[in-house]
Image (cartoon, rainbow, N blue to C red):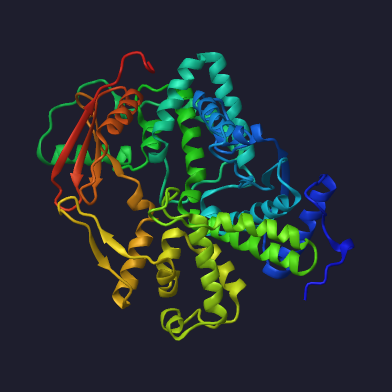
Amino acid sequence: MNAFAPNRLLFEGADWDFDTIRRIHDAVEELSRRSLGLDVFPNQIEIITAEQMLDAYASTGMPLFYKHWSFGKHFAQHETVYRKGLMGLAYEIVINSDPCISYIMEENSATMQTLVIAHAAFGHNHFFKNNYLFKQWTDPSGILDYLAFAKSYVAACEERWGHAAVERVLDAGHALQSQGVHRYPRKSVPDLLSEERRERDRQAHAERMYNDLWRTLPSRPAGGDARRRREERRRALLGLPQENLLYFLEKTAPRLAPWQREILRIVRNVAQYFYPQMQTKVMNEGCATFVHYQLMTGLHREGRISDGSFLEFLTSHTNVVRQPMYDDPSYNGINPYALGYAMMEDIARIATTPTDEDRAWFPDLAGNGDPIGTLRDVWANYRDESFIAQFLSPNLIRKWRFFHVRDDADEPVLRVERIHDERGYRALRRSLARQYDIAWLAPDIQVVDVDLDDTRRLVLRHRVLDGILLQPDDARRVLQHIADLWGYEVVLEEVSADTGATLKEHRTTARAGMFF
């Protein structure tokens, strides 16, 4: 029974002030711990204007960031579209930091402020703090200090070396940032003091070290085993093969100055920081959407928000989880909010009211009677690819009307390969999970060799999957950045993953005067 008591309402009408925001936050926090058992970083709520939200859009949402011309371009682009009414702004932006910073728009009504606090300050916050990928790859307590260091370092470089010189390095780094992450080993935790000490140590080390790799004296001709040993030693010293192109260039490019290497490292560290978010879009948004729905429903049930506010919330929630059909003009692929929320709801259903089919597919989960505990475990231990591969149920496949279409460029027609039967469910789940597997989304490009004896040519290899080659124009532009950073010729071989045959080759040389 929902018995409203006016003095229990958190607010009335659409207006709010700072006391209202504090009251909303405290009520949501208390309910989140009591009903969902959420474990979050301390919250810092920032009220910002639409223009500040546009500015946050342009600079990857970070509160502190170095300057770059592309951020201004993105700001002008977003502002123009927004002013013409062609796009809306997000109600919030949330930063994975400790304390967790949530930006909320001053134009929001009191109901929307309640919704975004529940969504961002508690849903996303809990996910950031507990998911294993964020624990493994990010340092919430150190990111703000590191961004402050990066901002001041780039500004100091601009003062000493000029804006144009710094922007050329940043342009090249940004072009390569998707190939600038370590995908497997644990990232070392950065902090401001260690970053400053490490930069000083690198400068001193470079001044005193004799680099055997780049010696200029010619070596005696060698053949057979001697040549093979030299090649193996060279590859071992260079750490080849190496999939992190930015890391390889930062450490090994023969002609970069220390300040240029440091800027590449900054770009690489920021790219690494966002890497977990790329792998958890469906889970992260699904978690936050499930949490905000539970908390808003709980507040309404306990008489803390009125019927009118709850209807306003339901309108926004319905829009967030809307999934347009493939022939709808607004269709833009699978909505991660919709799929994530639907899967969270489905897991809760299986845990409480399973069918015989659910018991067969999820014997460890079906009917365990603990939906929230199960979801907290899922949020902590999976990423999108494994989450879908493990928990997408036949019930949800039917509800979403998923089916598998094969689109082969060598065949004249599309072919429906999997439908709703036992084999089809498993194949559909594998196919959809693969679409969220970062190993299949990003091209597999590695540094495989360097000619140290003669031309100093750098050799890259793209392992081609399913015959999908790189776009020639994109490959040419990105390869030019690599060659400019490397300082010599660069070759990119595209090689079939199945046969090992070379399918295409790209070559380019460094442009004079870009960095040296």
Q: Is residue 133 above or below residue 206?
A: below
Q: Is residue 290 above or below residue 16?
A: below
Q: Is residue 59 visible?
A: no
User: What residue sits 54% from the left and 37% below the top?
Assistant: 60
Which of 97/336 is in front? 336
Q: Where is residue 112 in the image (x, y as percent from the top left)?
A: 70, 51
Q: Residue furthest left?
A: 224
Q: Where is residue 301 in the image (x, y as percent from the top left)?
A: 75, 69
User: What residue sits 45% from the left and 84% below the top?
Assistant: 359
Looking at the figure, which quarter contains the C terminus? top left
Which of 325/188 is in front? 325
Looking at the figure, which quarter contains the N terminus? bottom right
Q: Position of residue 452 (x, y in %)?
A: 24, 28
Q: Residue furthest right?
A: 7
Q: Is residue 445 above or below residue 148?
A: below
Q: Which residue lies furthest to the bottom in this view?
A: 356
Going by the image, does 469 lie left or right of 223?
Answer: right
Going by the image, does 418 lie left or right of 224?
Answer: right
**Number of numbered markers:** 0
User: What residue sits 44% from the left and 24% below the top?
Assistant: 169
Which of 125/345 is in front? 345
Q: Position of residue 306 (x, y in %)?
A: 78, 61
In the rendered image, which quarter is residue 240 located in?
top left
Q: Can residue 165 be seen in this view?
A: yes
In the rendered image, which quarter is residue 426 located in?
bottom left
